[in-house]
Image (cartoon, rainbow, N blue to C red):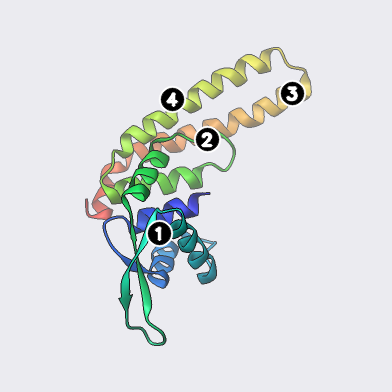
Amino acid sequence: MTVPYALLGLLEGTTRHGYDVKQAYDRRFGGTRPLRVGHVYRILAQLVRDGHVAEAGTEPGAGPERKRYAITEAGVTDLGRWLAEPEEPQPQLQAVLFVKVVLALMSGRPAEEYLDAQRDLHLARMRELTAARRAAGPQAALLADYQLFHIEADLRWIEHAAGRLDALRAEEGQ
């Protein structure tokens, strides 16, 4: 679910052809799992179909002409809504949080506000799990502990990221 939003964020403020979008994604978010070119074009086609991206002309390439893509106002609105919406605390969430922080910084949006909202949601979930754990049997309590430990790790990362926003902004040239 994060890849379409990442592509929207990479198109905000510029136009790009599909392969350029793929390369930008791989540089920023690919890490150990770069996107396949076909996947990028499928997602771009869906975003065009949904009105979040529009074709913005063509340019010559080594082979056929390359289509350039641009984010639409509907795409900017949807991206802004997604960035502002905290994610439900769950294991392995940090990759989504990381993408949101980088895209917020790239676009000049308030990354601090996103991290604050995410922290609030995590703390609320911790309170719920702690209360449930007190009344739970051993298996349910162990599962609650598992979830709590992951949420604690996410909270440590949120605090760490909040402390590094100035350095990240400088790296993004903001």
Q: Nearer the viewer, residue 145 or 118?
A: 118
| Residue 69 makes an appearance in the image | yes
Residue positioned 49% across, 36% down in the render: 87
Q: Percent position (x, y) of residue 62?
A: 38, 87
Residue type at the position of mark 2 = Ala
SS category of the residue bearing label 3: helix
**Relative to the observer, which residue lies in front, 33 or 64?**
64
- Of 10 and 70, the residue lying toward us: 70
Residue 12 placement (x, y as % from top left):
31, 55
At a point 67% along the width and 13% down the height, the residue shown is 134
Q: Is residue 149 left or right of residue 52?
A: right
In the depicted structure, whether residue 101 falls above or below residue 10: above
The tag earlier along the polypeptide, 4 or 2, is: 4
Question: Which numbered disc, 2 or 3, marks the residue that appears first in the sequence?
Answer: 3
The residue carrying mark 3 is 140
- Residue 153's disc is 2
Task: Find the residue positioned furthest to the bottom.
Answer: 62
Q: Earlier in the sequence, mark 1 or mark 3?
A: 1
Question: The disc labelled 4 sits on which kind of residue?
Answer: Asp
At horizontal 59% and vertical 31% (from top left) the residue drawn is 149
Q: CA distance from mark 1 to mark 3?
A: 38 Å
Report how far apart the C-alphas of labels 4 and 3 lie in the structure.
Answer: 24 Å
The answer to whether 139 appears left or right of 12 in the picture is right
Q: CA distance from mark 2 to mark 3?
A: 20 Å
Find disc 1 in the rendering and name its residue. 28
Residue at image mark 4:
120
C-alpha separation, residue under disc 1 versus residue under disc 4: 27 Å
In this rendering, the answer to whether 21 lies above or below 51 is below
The Cα–Cα distance between marks 2 and 1, rounded to whole angstroms, is: 23 Å
